Amino acid sequence: MERYQSSKELRLTYKKLRDEAPSDLRISKSREIVSNVLALLESDFKGANIFLCYYPFGSEIDLLPLYEKLLAKGKILYFPISETKNHNLLFFQISDLQKDFHIGSYNIMEPNESLPMFNYSKEDRIICITPGLLFDRNYNRIGYGAGFYDRFLSDKCNIIKLAPSFDSHLLVSIPSQAHDIKMDVIITEKEVLKGDRL
């Protein structure tokens, strides 16, 4: 990290690295990550039924096979709509990965607003599968720069933040600020990191 001076430079460099990776390699690594996530959910989070998810875009990890398996298990899945004016996220429950979406903000697939909306409760056991471009071994995250997830998660302490990441995008250390939300679990194709909270 020494030659990088800012999160912006890191974003540009590692976004390019991810975009230029061979698609077959991304697919293979995505499958391994999904397998590791499912194994962790079965061992550590078997009782979790509510999942806040994100729809993979571009060169991101392909998590659709994970979501298919969670739906088949009867889990409740919510996906976000991005309110671009105030940088807020609203989550809606989906039951069909093909029929319940439309192209939304930033050309990312978003759930139809006619679907049931997520209502946060401190009593529920909720797992947020959190997107990010980079993570580090101190559970810090660099997203895409708009702060949607930091804002959404800032006052929801009972939500478990689970971050899938390519191993190449898990660094020893990345820049962080006081308002940045740390992850609880980071899962790559090679390993699973569990924070002190678990």
Image (cartoon, rainbow, N blue to C red):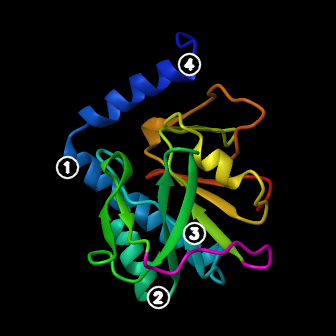
Give the residue type that dot 3 points to.
Leu
Q: Is 73 left, or right, of 183 in this rendering?
A: left
Q: Measuring from the top left, give residue 39's x and y in whole percent.
A: 52, 72
Q: Is 157 left, or right, of 113 in this rendering?
A: right
Q: Quadrant of the N terminus?
A: top right
Q: Are marks 4 and 2 in contact (CB under 8 Å)?
A: no
Q: Which residue, given by chain and number where applicable, does mark 2 sit on?
A: 73
Q: Which residue, given by chain and number where applicable, does mark 4 sit on?
A: 1
Q: Which residue, given by chain and number where applicable, does mark 1 sit on?
A: 24
Which of 157/119 is in front? 119
Residue at x 30% of width, y 44% of height: 59
Q: CA distance from mark 1 to mark 3?
A: 25 Å
Q: CA distance from mark 1 to mark 4?
A: 28 Å
Q: What number is the disc on residue 33?
A: none
Q: Which residue, given by chain and number where applicable, does mark 3 sit on?
A: 40
Q: Quadrant of residue 137?
A: top right
Q: CA distance from mark 2 to mark 1?
A: 28 Å
Q: Measuring from the top left, give residue 130's x and y in whole percent.
A: 55, 54
Q: Quadrant of residue 153?
A: bottom right
Give the residue type that dot 1 points to.
Asp
> Looking at the image, is 17 positioned above or below residue 184?
above
